[in-house]
Amino acid sequence: MSPGTGEACLRKRLPSHPCDACASVCPVEAITLMPGAIQLDATRCLHCGRCLFSCPVDALEDLAAPERYLRNGALVAPLAALAPAVDELLMWHREKGVRAVEMAMDEHPGWVLAVAALNLKLADLGEPGWSIVPPATQHNARRRWLRLPERVSLPTSVSPGRRARRRIFAEHAEFQPVIAQAACTLCGACIRVCTESALRFTADRLEIRPERCTGCQSCRVVCVPGAISLEPVQAVAPRYAAFYHALCRTCQQPFRAWQADATRCPLCQRHRYGMREA
């Protein structure tokens, strides 16, 4: 099967969605964005996995995360010519407990930059950084003569995608949904479109859970008044906004409102003749 995107792709689910997460990280421009879809050129794809780790909804199909080699908590040779992105290295850090890369720095400059970028991110998260260690000298005459095997694990991989990263770094948040109450009509469109349950209604509150947000921007896309924005954040701090239940005096339909004395629903407020829109 040729790699591509499934129905979960934001561009397929919401044709007006501007998501370019996969295309923006592809090092060979193998992904072409189109209205309502994306196209992945299998002949150009390097299978580096960068698109997999950047997708907020796990939409890519028939692509596997890159396999790498481990020894004693370090990634070891053979190292890929193209260094992994920070998103992937974060999963190696938490999911596999990796804390180093075994390599000659002058032979892998791309990996050196990747580790440096990773350490900046880990410092923000309060996590221990990685080190670069010289290759272990194991192929001495005695080892070759005895034919002793190297203690290197079979190639393995880590879970790709922003969803997996949110699960494994549950104590941190990457995005904070922010709602401008002056513009929000409490219609619930953002809640219905959010596949991560980062937004939801309780009996009398709008609950925002930033630790679940993958930054897919779907809530912002469907918000007609443009009341939602996403801000970068590192701390997990659930937020709640209280609202009231009211009955519209014009159409006699129940609605949610930020004010206790609200008497007309947002639809009737928009109609100049006092008639609710169909």
Image: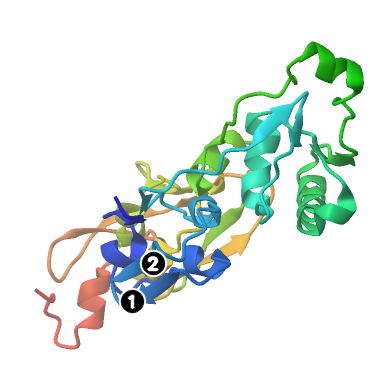
Q: Residue furthest left?
A: 278
- Identity of the residue drawn at 36% across and 55% down: 3
Q: Nearer the viewer, residue 41 or 250?
A: 41
Q: Amino acid at mark 2?
A: Asp
- Identity of the residue drawn at 83% across and 37% down: 128
Q: Amino acid at mark 1?
A: Met
Q: Nearer the viewer, mark 1 or mark 2?
A: 2
Q: Residue furthest front?
A: 145
Question: Alpha-carbon distance for marks 1 and 2?
Answer: 13 Å
Number of residues whose C-alpha sits closer than 10 Å to that of mark 2, classed few (under 14), some (14–19) or many (20 or more): some
- The percent coordinates of residue 125 (x first, y second) are 76, 44
Residue 98 vs 267, above or below: the answer is above
Q: Nearer the viewer, residue 188 or 57?
A: 57
Do the residues under discs 1 and 2 have CB atoms within 8 angstroms? Answer: no
What SS does tag 2 mark? loop
Q: Residue furthest bottom?
A: 272
- The percent coordinates of residue 185 (x first, y second) are 35, 67
Q: Nearer the viewer, residue 40 or 78?
A: 78
From where the camera sits, is residue 94 visible? Answer: yes
Which corner quadrant holds the C terminus? Answer: bottom left
> Is 29 positioned to the left or the right of 34 in the image?
right
Residue 259 vs 29, above or below: the answer is above
What SS does tag 1 mark? strand
- The percent coordinates of residue 83 (x first, y second) are 69, 54
From where the camera sits, is residue 185 visible? Answer: no
Residue 8 numbered mark, or none: none
Q: How is the image coloured?
A: rainbow
- The percent coordinates of residue 80 (x first, y second) are 66, 49
Residue 41 numbered mark, or none: 2
| Mark 1 vs 2, N-terminal side | 1
Q: How many marks?
A: 2
Residue at image mark 1: 34
